[in-house]
Image (cartoon, rainbow, N blue to C red):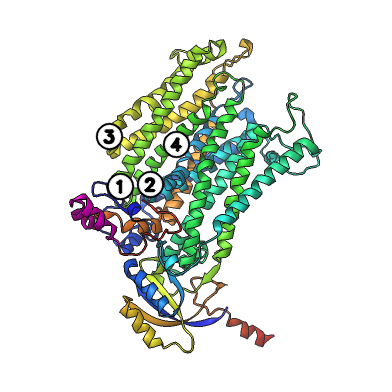
Amino acid sequence: MAKKKFVVGLFNDEDVLFPAVKKVRTAGYKLHDVYTPFPVHGLDHAMGLRETSLHTAGFIYGITGTTTALGCISWIFTKDWPLNIGGKPHFALPAWIPIIFELTVLFSAVGMVLTFCYLCQLAPFVKKHVFHKRATDDLFVMVIETTGKTNIDDLKGFLSNNGALETYEEIAEDGWWLGRYDKDEIPFENRKEVAVVA
Amino acid sequence: MASIKYESQLREPLVYGTKDYHQVTEDICRPIEAKPSKLWYIGFFTSVALLLFGVYSVYREVTYGIGQWNLNKTVGWGWDITNFVWWVGIGHAGTLISAILLLFRQGWRTGVNRAAEAMTIFAVMCAGQFPIFHMGRVWMAFFVLPYPNTRGPLWVNFNSPLLWDVFAISTYFTVSLLFWYSGLIPDFGTVRDRAKTKLRKRLYGIASFGWSGSTKHWQRHEALSLVLAGLSTPLVLSVHTIVSFDFATSVIPGWHTTIFPPYFVAGAIFSGFAMTQTLLLVIRKVYGLQDYITMGHIEAMNKVIVLTGSIVGVAYLTELFMGWYSQNKYEGYTFWYSRANLFSPYGWSYWGMMACNVLSPQIFWFRKFRRNIFITFFMSVIVNVGMWFERFVIIVTSLYRDYLPSSWSVYYSPTIWEIGFYMGTFGLFFTCFFLFSKYFPVIAIAEIKHVLKTTGESYKAKVGHIEEAPMEEFAYKYAHIENTGAHGRGSSGMEHH
């Protein structure tokens, strides 16, 4: 959790955004993120992000569900309390298929959603810095991280030349914190006061 | 892939008009930000009144016992299980639209999936009430769960279809809820960032889980949606299959048939789409969303209705045929006397079912009727009346005259408290739906924006002239029409066309 200085460029067309992303990367600037109102296909590749492994996690959760169901039911019906149901086999696998299937789906779905929320830091009461309010409406917001050496004006000009409608610099917290969207509190700075009182 | 994104000039656009991204946000957020109309209040409080009547009916049943209903030893399942199967059936369209149509790349699902999924969740909530309160001692309801207990431990019977049902319905509810809510998170972000009042900012801030729209998050979101769709597809088919096992694994004539699983699934899709029509026709009119929920959507859903209605019709006729062909006296009696004979005590319900489910949807073979709003609305109600009759026919006409004539039931008809319970679930359903339509984005905003560039009038104008060119030239030009760089990259998530 640290405050950093960012340069923000606003785009209103994904057709302009794509070449701009490529140029920013080849020019060697550190692309912090691009905030878009909807999933723009191929943008993750253009930004050089790696493929998500959420699918694999889902598969593992699913297998866990299968084995949990199969293990529990067979232990219960063959070891713990074998019920004689019309002299039929205690290990009645075909009759267990529905429950095994349902638990596979349940584990996989719940596990994946929780993993998704964990990876993206999504939870009720979580707040993140909003670089531009229209990032969830109609603007594609490109955010570039700067260092002490970055020439801010050059960067702004570079973005404008590549189709940015507007550019500005912003100092912002890059992580998440527990906060409210109706208040513009400054995260983590209240801690100092607490420390002083103590 | 470029070829996947192409929408022909001949094809009806998914979104009418020449809209930009901001216009989409405005149109869909308007009902949330405006004050509810007088009609909304009337509808909402009527629903709450119905719900309260239902609560009182259930209170009587819990206090005085199942005797408050007219069930008896012969007709042990009546309105309660009829209503349960009816509501579960309605709850199938939402996940079908969002999951199966997503896998089939049906672009038109974007306009209707959010509301249909909400309908699914509320319908499953209503369905669940019936088996739970049918237990009689509802405070013992947790006995259906397999947990270590001090009675042995005596476990539940994993070989019983009734227990499969517990797992199927609760899994279906959970997965549908997760699927729905994960789709809502980005849209709540949109509503939050537009909010003017403090309260709105705060509440939608909580509901949006701190969504920012980061590309990495979208990438994961796409992966999540795709896998959840893949999981929900077999799930939605399994749920009504398992509900049909409640009947099919028994030895009651009229229930003991192998065609029940596909027949029940087709019936569920049939009634679910009908209920989606009923609700969407009202929503698009009241909130002025005709450009998003278009005649094209209505027609597509009517096609599904005529298809599934006909599948159900074939199943009815097959059952009748087998009732005769099997030469089984009990089957023959159930199908040819208790059901198909109009003058038997419940013959009216069988012929009501036939008229509503098989005969009347056939008018949707005609395009003119498929695109007529009044006929669609009327038919959507008729279909759900018919599907209620179907479940009533299956349950009551198989039970009321069993193997032993001395226990043949006198005419079963419900008490006011049985009817009240059913009315109460209508109250619950519509209370939830009114709240949803006021406080939630009723159309998936991000998904509409995603398809916007490749549909609508501006896109048609763009591709119109090259479509008239010779084939080779057309293929060359089309391959270069989108210079986004998005195509040919093997993008990570789902495509919509």
SS class, disc 3: helix
Which of discs 2 and 4 lies nearer the camera? The answer is: 2
Residue at point 40%, 59% (across, down):
B446
Mark 1 Cα shell of 10 Å, populated few (<14), some (14-19), many (≥20)? many
Q: Are marks 4 and 3 in contact (CB under 8 Å)?
A: no
Which of discs 2 and 1 lies nearer the camera? The answer is: 2
Query: Residue beneath label 1, please?
Result: B294
Q: Amino acid at mark 3?
A: Phe
Magenta run includes residue B21: no
Q: Amino acid at mark 1?
A: Thr
Residue stretch in magenta:
B461-482
Q: Disc 4 and disc 1: Cα gap in Å? A: 21 Å
Residue B152 shown left or right of residue B79 in the figure: right
* Subunit under mark 3: B
Q: Amino acid at mark 2?
A: Gln
Is A157 above or below relative to A179? below
